[in-house]
Image (cartoon, rainbow, N blue to C red):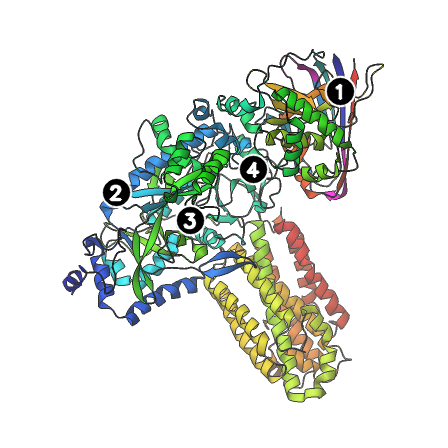
Amino acid sequence: MRYNLHLEIHYSFGHVAAGGRQLLRVLPATVPGRQQVARSRLAITPAPLEERRFRDFFGTEVIEIVLPGGLTDLLVEMTAEVARDETVPVPPDTSAPPGAMAAELAALASLAPDSPHHFLFPSPRVPGVPEIARFARAAVAGTTTVASAVTRLGLALNRAIAFDPRATEVDTPIAQAFRQRRGVCQDIAQIMIAGLRSQGIPAAYVAGYLRTRPPPGRPRLVGADAMHAWVRAWCGRAAGWIDYDPTNACRVNGDHVEVGFGRDYGDVAPVTGSLRMEGGQSGSHSVDIAEI
Amino acid sequence: MADDRAENGIRPPRGYAALPGVPDEMVAADGTVRPSWRRLAGLLAAEGPQEIAQRRVRAEQYLRDSGVFYRQYGAGGSDERPWPLSPVPVLVEAADWETLIPGLVQRADLLEALMADLYGENRLVAEGHLPPDLIAANPEWLRPMVGIRPASGHFLHFLAFEIGRGPDGTWWVLADRTQAPSGAGYALENRVATSRAFSELYAEMNVHRLAGFFRDFRDSLLAPGRDGDGRVLLLTPGPLNETYYEHAYIARYMGLTLVQGEDLTVANGRLHLRTVAGPAPVDALWRRLDSGYADPVELDPESRIGTPGLVSALRAGGLVMINALGSGVLETRALMAFLPRLAPVLLGADLRLPNIATWWLGGAAERATVLADPAARMLSPALATGLPFDSPEETHPAPGQGATADLARRLKAEGPSLVAQEVVRLSTTPTLIDGRLEPRPMTLRVFLARVDGRWQAMPGGFARIGASRDPAAIAMQRGGSTADVWVLGGPPGASVTLVPAVTGTYRRAAERTLPARAADNLFWLGRYVERTETAVRILRAAHVRLAESGADARPLLQGIEPLHGFYGIETGRGIPAGLLDTLTAAVATAGRVRDLFSTDAWSALADIARTAQQMAARVTPGDDAARALSALLRKLAGVSGLVHENMYRSQGWRFLTIGRQQERAMGMAAILAILADPRLPAGALDMAVEIGDSVMTHRRRFAVATGPATVIDLLGLDGDNPRSIRHQVDGLAEQIALLPAAEDRGRPRAPLRAIMRIQVDLATQTPEGLTTGELWSLRSRIADLSDRLTEAYFS
């Protein structure tokens, strides 16, 4: 499948902002064997004073910009053409039994960016939350493989948590989102990550885009008008990483376009930096993905 | 005489004995005093409690006069505490020191190699030498720093090691301080204070001096960078930090500019300091700020004390960071379990100096070791970075019999997140308690600095001494104290001064451009001090009238109430709260520029604030208040004298002076506008002359009673009267013209333009023309200078 992808991020500032340094993580990634970027283009208004690119620890391409002072509006536009492999049939379950995860991890001595060791411990936005751990324990009880535990927990959370864009903000703690059983893809993914980690399953946060215009005869997916997020769980050395979208209760497939991954939202947030810290702004994201 | 003392010193001073089974620094196992301690022991044995107390007083006097303090945190916030010094130094023999230092240098090299691996290839984890989760779960391992090579070629430049002497008399490392080691400045202060207490011994005993260490490190830092300037800054978290005093002290001592995160800015991959003359590029940053706070964009986004883009500047490669961001990971307690095994891997040699026995409980064998003898171990979080004894989370694993099964379960469940360490037994050193020498447990902090690529040790250090015989009582926050460390065997007759002797060609260093924030603070310090003085003068004049005329003074006092409004004061109380607020603001502002402000002036200012607080509690309106206010005025004159007689005419002094002149000009304009108003009762003009401290001058110059014209002439337009508006405006014009870039291609910039216009208008004004309305307008034009200065210099 080939997609034309268009992203617009717009911020309006209540006062004249001082400008400053921002990091953007919005470019679709090239993932060998799964996703190729044919071209991408970024336009920022007003023009930044400085612009450079680097890859962060987890390999996400970061655009670092320094904006001039006297800012009242900021517009980031990104267009890209991405080739995404067709949905492949789910392979047979070769994942480890839950009880073997400690040994599986111990056998993997690595701190490479995709090493599961990065994704087992609490991170700034995904602390340990006892209620989530209890929920996860009940949801995965009786499963015999980690992959089935991932699916079970994802399904349970999908049923328990209502998608509600008005219920949470970008900084709402996961404990609160879980307590109110409402939130958006970011909340649901981070709650699932907390649940998986509590059960000894390393879990990463993946940021990306979701096809907004469904093929004929298929329903439009939830969360399609903004950036999307899902979960990447490590299921032992044999099965490796499995991507699961708890917001739509499905394995990640040809509808998902990846930007990058990290321990939680903070590692792959689309915009971070000194403007965000000043607050007082209003923003909107809009995404359009059309199949070519 | 010297021989007598040596003879006398073989036996310890009366009543002093080592604790059973514990090695003592002064007394050997056979009960005799060690040779290097005999002169000190003899001296102490020969003196009575009074003489010994005198020595302590001399040391404490120095610390108090220098304003040495540290910040202590408690339930109700934090406060400044006097520095707890034990005046008896810890003596270390040259031979002992010479075996210790190579072990520490080797350890520093090991830490450097470990750091390079953790922020580079991560070979140690990949090859199974380190468990991955110890690093992956570690909040001090900063992923954004992985792959960034240090510009100097080294990650570590300044380290400290906390060491103790074990039961067999050998040294052990208790903790590595790699993040932003503190204590070197306090070691200097301890040295000066202790040498005051034992001046005769210090002069005779060939103690190694400390100045050379700081001088060499400083020269190494200032060695011309690739851009030739060699600008080095000391980065502090700010005045509320526990050891801010030390940051200011080291900055002053070493001649480095002290900055906070907001003073810095990154542009085009280069770090700059915001100065009064614009952004100046920075070559090296010696940070006393923990890594996570350093950059809110790439590190902790919650940090309010960082510099956005600092990591970006490091990635670009033009900045030396001392130490590299992320070096806090080396303080992880569990790493001590691995360092002995890593030394052969990284250095090809075994550790020369052992560290405290440590077991990371992720392994079954280690758990078994702890379970075999729980009482001899302490448990703490594997990722703890605090000093041993400082961490509240340390626990004894087994309170009693029968708990072993619980412990086994706990270790199995939480093993990877725990370390066990042997319960430390430390040597003791003599300290003065209630006038008597008592043995107390001791640790030493030893400092290593990289000088021209090689490690150099400070020949001395910083001893921490326990408050009781329990080694855990060593934490200063729990009442422990500190002592100076004298390493013996230095060159005889070395200079006593800490100021390095000048050798080679004398070169006068160019004045470093003042950071914009420091200029801002000095300007406001000048304003607050002057505002305090004006308020005190106004209040005193009012209370004198209350005392003399009682109720008859009411109409006049009501007439000047608008003036009270400007200063937030009132006459209902002897010392009003508004006055205390202004003084508090002055002290707080001075506290933010301690590296630039005279120590004596600082002490004097803090003393005034204390005195005023005490007065506020008891002074009553009228005569009592008038006398108290006169006393405050005399003290304020002392501060001004210290600043103006002693402070170098640097940019800093200039901003302080400008603040003072501006405030005084504004004050006098308001006083005249209100008191020279013809609608006020008789006596108002006399009051203005009195507040303006010009009673005698008026009498001499005019030989008539006060009238509006004479008073406005004297206090407004007479350039020879140091209290007049004209005098202040002339001074402002003179000082502002000397500020950096006061003119741009021959044309005055905004601040100079504004003051020159005021100056011309005032010079051509007549007493009759300077009406109440004109005075208010003049005051507001002078007040506007603040904004012009802020735009041009403070932002």
- Badge 2, how many Cα within 10 Å: few under 14, some, many 20+? few
Q: Disc 3 or disc 2, which is closer to the eye?
A: 3
The magenta stretch spans which residues? A10-39
Residue B98: mark = 2
The residue carrying mark 1 is A5
Using the rendered image of the protein, determine whether residue B729 is visible from the camera's viewpoint. Answer: no
Tell how many labels. Answer: 4
Location of mark 3 (residue): B389
In the rendered image, residue A200, in percent from the top left (x then y), is placed at 57, 28
Q: Which comes before the other along the chain, label 3 or label 4?
A: 4
Q: How far apart are marks 4 and 2 (CA)?
A: 39 Å
**What chain letter is assigned to the residue under label 1?**
A
Q: In which quarter of the image is residue B722?
A: bottom right
Looking at this view, is B70 or A238 the one in front? A238
Residue type (three-letter) at the residue carrying disc 4: Leu
Q: Mark 4 points at which residue?
A: B310
Please check the rendered image and state whether residue A180 is part of the magenta-colored stretch, yes or no.
no
Task: Indicate the chain on which mark 3 is placed.
Answer: B
Q: Which percent across, then down, holds residue B114?
A: 42, 31
- State whether residue B102 appears in this view: yes
